[in-house]
Image (cartoon, rainbow, N blue to C red):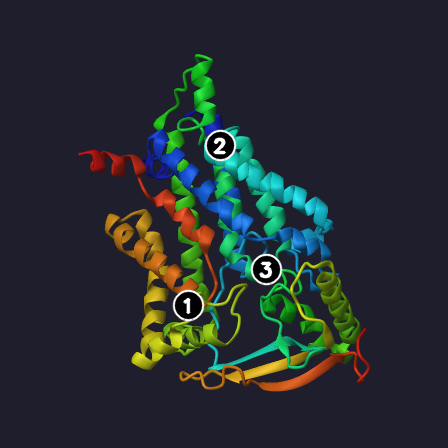
Amino acid sequence: VRFAAAWHRFWFPPRRAEDLAVCRILFAAGMFPVGLSRPIHEWGEVPAFLHQPADFLRLLRIPILDTGVLQGMEFVWLGAMVTLAVGWYSRTSAAVVCLGSLYLFGIDAPEFLGRAVTAGVFVPAILAVSYCGDVLSVDAWLCRRRGQVINRPAEEYGWPARLVCVFLSYMFFAGGVAKIRVTGFPEWMLSNETTRDLLLGHYWYASRDRALWPVGAQLLQIYAGAGVALGMITQFAELLYPLALFVRAARLTVVPVVLAILIGIMVTMGPFFHLTMLAHVFWVPWSSVDHRRRR
Amino acid sequence: MSFRRRRVVYGLVAIVLGGNLASFIFFEQLWPYSPYPMFARARELTFETLALVGEPVDGGEIWFESQGYLSHQVSPMVITNGFWNDVYGPGMNGLDEHLRETYEFYERRRRKGLSNAPPLRRLQLYRFNWTLRRDLANLRTPRRTLIASYPSDDRPAQ
């Protein structure tokens, strides 16, 4: 009985509707420029031998459609991000964003370039099941005009953020464990891998994008052991990330360190984990922040 | 919260986390599930890649990076992956055909005004190999191995 109660408390913490609404607004509004910056419809004209869609699309024989059709899908997908941000047909919009991401990111070489955008599928899926449009939304305004009162238990607004945070915890923990499985512990962090990735940003592409500001070589010239030091910080931060679900001190230290690592990777190496970074808005109890600010 | 509603939420938890857990256990990537193995290998301070190099009609050479000559989605990593099976598969099957297709695609986009690419005399596929150095002295001078060229003789491609 005690375990069941603890399990319930973990998954359904009471939160204010405003917390979830702010997360919805920030995530959808932040995802919009990401979608806009990727002309995925161009895959429709690229020679077929360069196509690298997700395996599940190949298995289900779902084709890469013509450029015009893809452009139409992109338009609907981006439009749904806007309606999700303003909270108009919030749950339907979230479902459209989720399905759009699944297909459009799914044709965009996701098996080797898509790890940065998995949050673009899972977070909208979570929002689609949640009541994310109950406040700070057009939906709420329309309800008020019709004289309807929304009255839901506070747990309804707690589980979506909890599930996003558990998903993020899995992501980083799995990343830390993968390094142990493939290379070993502490072999990976003591190896040249981080040094290599810091230098590679100057030379060529380690991902879709080139390093934003390749400073790895300068860093290594100042201190040759910078690669190993950063490797150690990275792997420990990844492995300790799930602690943030249970321990406040970890939430205040490990999560910001991981965010700093993601920014560092973008600047010095190239891979840009924009949607993963954006999903971190779900860690923040926005109404408490606002309450503290007003005091 | 009602029991039915809780069941819906746990169903979603199973979809989001269950698929990822399976991906983690089997160490297999199946979009959008992943064990997130990026940067997990410990590699030497070397780097090898396939690279497209164009010889413009006006002379010089251009490396196909992310200028958008082959659309913005075809990044150097996509090029490497696309040609990988051709180059490392048995008998380099399809390599010449794919290089010709790439050249024609490049020209089609250029003529439509979709890219500001220069007209090419020849398109070549190279293997670039670098020893990564902290002083970056060899940035634009990788060891290069010519793998294939279109057209393969001295005739202009047009």
Where is mark 2, residue-wise? B7
Distance between the Cα atoms at labels 1 and 2?
Answer: 47 Å
Q: Chain of mark 1?
A: A
Q: Which residue is mark 1?
A: A213
Q: Viewer-nearest of labels 2 and 3? A: 3
The 10 Å Cα crowd at callout 2, few under 14, some 14 to 19, many 20 or more, is: few
Q: Single out the residue that lies furthest toward the top.
A: A147
Splitting the image into 4 quarters, where does residue A282 fall? Answer: top left
Mark 1 and mark 3 lie on one chain; the one further toward the N terminus is 3
Q: Dot 1: what SS?
A: loop
Residue A13 x, y percent position in the rendering:
33, 35
**Which amino acid does the dot numbered 2 rest on?**
Arg
Query: Can marks 2 and 3 be said to lie on one chain?
Result: no
Residue B109 numbered mark, or none: none
Residue at the spot of label 3: A111
SS of the residue under disc 2: helix
Given residues A157 and A22, the one toward you in this image is: A22
Q: Amino acid at mark 1?
A: Trp
Q: Residues within 10 Å of mark 1 (few under 14, many from 20)?
A: some
